[in-house]
Image (cartoon, rainbow, N blue to C red):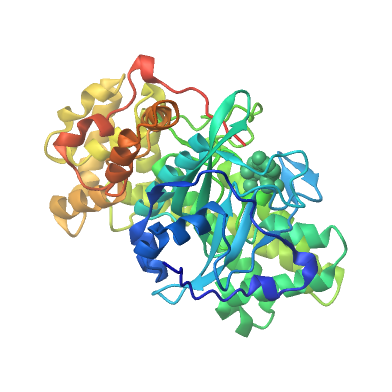
Amino acid sequence: MTIRIPFDNSYARLPDRFYARLEPKPIAAPRLVRLNTALAGQLGIDPEELASPDGVAMLAGNAVPPGAEPIAQAYAGHQFGHFVPQLGDGRACLLGEVTGRDGIRRDIQLKGSGTTPFSRAGDGRAALGPVLREYLISEAMAALGVPTTRTLAAVTTGEPVWRETRLPGAVLTRVATSHIRVGTFQYFAARGDTEAVRLLADHAIARHYPEAAGADNPYRAFLDAIIGAQAGLVARWLLIGFIHGVMNTDNCAVSGETIDYGPCAFMDEYDPATVFSSIDRGGRYAYGNQPRIAQWNLARLAETLLPLLGVDEVSAMAAAQESLAAFAPIFQTAYLSGLRRKIGLAAEREGDDALTQGFLALLAAGKVDFTLAFRALPGAIEDAAALRPLFADGEAFDAWAGRWRSRLAEEPGGPGTASAVMRAANPAFIPRNHLVEAALAAATEQSDFAPFEALLGVLSRPYQDDPALAAFARGPLEQERVLQTFCGT
Ligand code: AMP
Ligand code: MG
């Protein structure tokens, strides 16, 4: 079955120095282990074609479909604060772009598709575990309503990859509104290539922030739009307990989508200092540091745009600083309004911030599960005692619950509305580390994909209670606790 995808590849029309043209490297024995048929439909691609031998050959990197123009994109990046002037797609290959049923243009990219001119010492490949991990978590994020890259498919290669041990190899098909990173801007700025920075900004404006094109200074409006998108994104991460784990500037997309699911994790019990990533020894990317780091990354972006921001250096610097100063208030507003909804408040009153912070302080003090506590909160509208056992300090909880219930009484919609507000803001199901690890272990060690499928199904409806799925909602038992996650690259 011929695969018909109406590719239109705007990035490949940018100058040669933006990428390397290449073919994905074929694999021995492709097997489609998961296809995201709903996403294929959104993209206007026939899932049956994708599942056919020609489709699988494309998803494996064994055949380049008509209209694709495969490239590896050039980018740089600050990794844990240290600048690397050339990173680039070392194991990814952008096949091309398609405009979906929703009119949105998206990249279709293979990840794990072999070496590229940017591979450095790497093998260009991906292991099945991290591929399934990205599949699960990116799709969970999408269902949770968080802007994110998506996963269209996972294919096993029939070839081993060598990390610390021999692992089964796989290729992931990633879908993103673009793969333009802060690090892409840094790549050109580091080379003094202002013309390329301008071309890239124009390209990104057209794709992501077309309204900026009409502003007095389109590049300033572009920077402001990215700052707004990133501030909103990180607020959403915090509101669901997500820790990205590697917020390097090359993993920070100007679209405002979450990108690069490596050692990311959801926290169980609430503690702002939580770190899972084995490589984040200093806690740079800890849960509670994420807003600060996003702002730092945006400052690196602003630096690359300086030549476009003002008529001279002084005015450009002033503009950049003014734009960056807006990050904190935008983040705070988004975060606090999200927190208010998490405790059932649709209206805004003075003292609400202290009330939400009071609840977080109780969670931190009692090492209470973040997701469970918020999901259980509607039950405390009628009967606060229902929640009391979760907290080490019952009296402190009673005092808070008293304040909270009197505040709820002021809500125009009454308790019914508050309950609905909370249920829409507080997921019942998140990709718990212990469930993710168990699903990946079954798939990679026993070729048993049933736990992966079951988890993926549950995570596609994160706000729908189902008593039959209690095992997916609860926190880890002591022996199930996952203390570290690995990027596996
Ligand atoms: P990441 O940790 O996935 O954000 O990747 C950081 C950089 O390392 C990017 O330039 C990747 O393309 C590159 N990279 C990661 N894994 C591999 C690999 N197995 N082979 C080649 N390059 C890789
Ligand atoms: Mg990356």
Residue 301 placement, left or right of 163:
right
The answer to whether residue 370 of the structure is visible from this angle is yes
Residue depicted at x 61% and y 85%: 214
Residue 25 placement, left or right of 390:
right
Establish if 99 lies above or below 117: below
Residue 397 placement (x, y as % from top left)? 27, 28
Residue 95 placement (x, y as % from top left)? 59, 63
The N terminus, quarter of image: bottom left
Residue 22 placement (x, y as % from top left)? 71, 60
Residue depicted at x 15% and y 36%: 467
Q: Classify the position of ligand 1 by quadrant: top left, top right, bottom left or bottom right.
A: top right
Residue depicted at x 44% and y 52%: 153
Front residue of 255/439: it is 439
Establish if 431 lies above or below 208: above
Residue 234 placement, left or right of 376:
right
Residue depicted at x 43% and y 26%: 445
Residue 65 placement (x, y as % from top left)? 54, 67
> Which residue of the protein is positioned furthest toward the top in this rendering?
479
Question: How many numbered badges does the structure rendering display?
Answer: 0
Front residue of 69/422: it is 69
Front residue of 269/481: it is 481
Q: In which quarter of the image is residue 428?
A: top left
Q: In which quarter of the image is residue 53?
A: bottom left
Residue 185 placement, left or right of 205:
right
The C terminus, quarter of image: top right
Establish if 56 lies above or below 481: below
The answer to whether residue 330 of the structure is visible from this angle is no
